[in-house]
Image (cartoon, grey):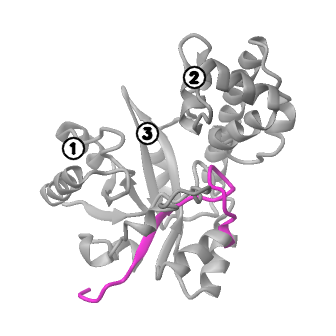
Amino acid sequence: MSEIMLIDLQLHSTYSDGYLTPSEAAKFVAGQGVKVAALTDHNTISGIDEFRNACYKYKIKPVTGLELYVKLHNWRFNLLWYNFDETDPDLHNMLRNSQVRRRRMVRLALKRLVSKGFKIDFDKILDKYNHYVPINRVVDDFLRVSYNAKRARRELDLKRPAEGDIIREYFYSKEIGILHNSFIDMDRIVELKKKIGGRLVLCHPAKSSCLARDFLLIVKKLGVTGLEKLSPHHSYNSTMFLQRLAREYGLIETGGSDFHCFEGGQAPLQYSWQYYKVDSKLLRGVKKIIG
């Protein structure tokens, strides 16, 4: 693979916490010169068919993908899953159960904010999201109410609170309550993988602090065969360290933009592809995933 081939194996759409539809996401990466792409929405595969059809339209090779929130003992981390049988009913049941738990957790978080005097129609908000309930877009809904926006600006003492400011203050606060992700047991994923196949890859492991060798040994024995080396969440040093670990443990290397949205406003950088590209020739063994 000496010739440059741009790929993107981590994209998100409106089916989870992205802001583009699967078709719009495919059109966007096609404009960046991407030739192979995967939609990896959180705990849902509902956008895959639309994404696949759009990829064919834009002459992109689609890879079946998914991002999961996973728990194993005391570890909490994200996994990317590629090339599995997306039609399997046990997979759909597992994902639907996680989505129901997520919805219940978000409802409780919104109720806590209502008890603090914020104005929130949580049924109206939750009815907008039929799959994974994305906290970033829930924050958007929260801030559309002028009372909430004014109060948040006053309490945070910020003219324009960022999404992260709102999440930390009102959703990940010990005083108000912490919104937890809907994690899936690693053992359940391992069992399901025996049935539906595919490749499990550690998702932005440096961001999740999943760089310990004992952790890598354990998840490799459980069937994880790759790690995401190229990610906008990684520093140069962590990328180099991940490269070393991948070779040390015989793991496939992948990469993705983790694209969710355009920044908007007057920001000179609007999306990661303006400064960051994923070249397949830099990724050890990635052909086992992209073909």
Q: CA distance from mark 2 to mark 3?
A: 34 Å
Q: Which mark is residue 187?
A: 3
Q: Which residue lies at the image location 59% right of the left edge and 22% below the top edge?
A: 156
Q: Residue 78's x, y, as percent?
A: 43, 44
Q: Residue 111's x, y, as percent?
A: 76, 19
Return the residue at label 1.
217
Q: Which mark is residue 169?
A: 2
- Amino acid type at circle 3 is Asp
Which of pointers 1 and 2 indicates the residue nearer the eye? Answer: 2
Stretch in magenta: 1-23
- Is residue 20 found inside the magenta-colored segment of the image? yes
Q: CA distance from mark 1 to mark 2?
A: 36 Å
Q: Is residue 170 above or below residue 99?
A: above
**SS at circle 2:** helix
Q: Which residue lies at the image location 60% right of the left edge and 63% below the top edge?
A: 86
Q: Which residue lies at the image location 27% right of the left edge and 70% below the top edge?
A: 283
Q: Residue 249's x, y, as percent?
A: 17, 55
- Whether residue 214 is visible, yes or no, is yes
Rendered-image quadrant of the N terminus:
bottom left
- Amino acid type at circle 1 is Leu
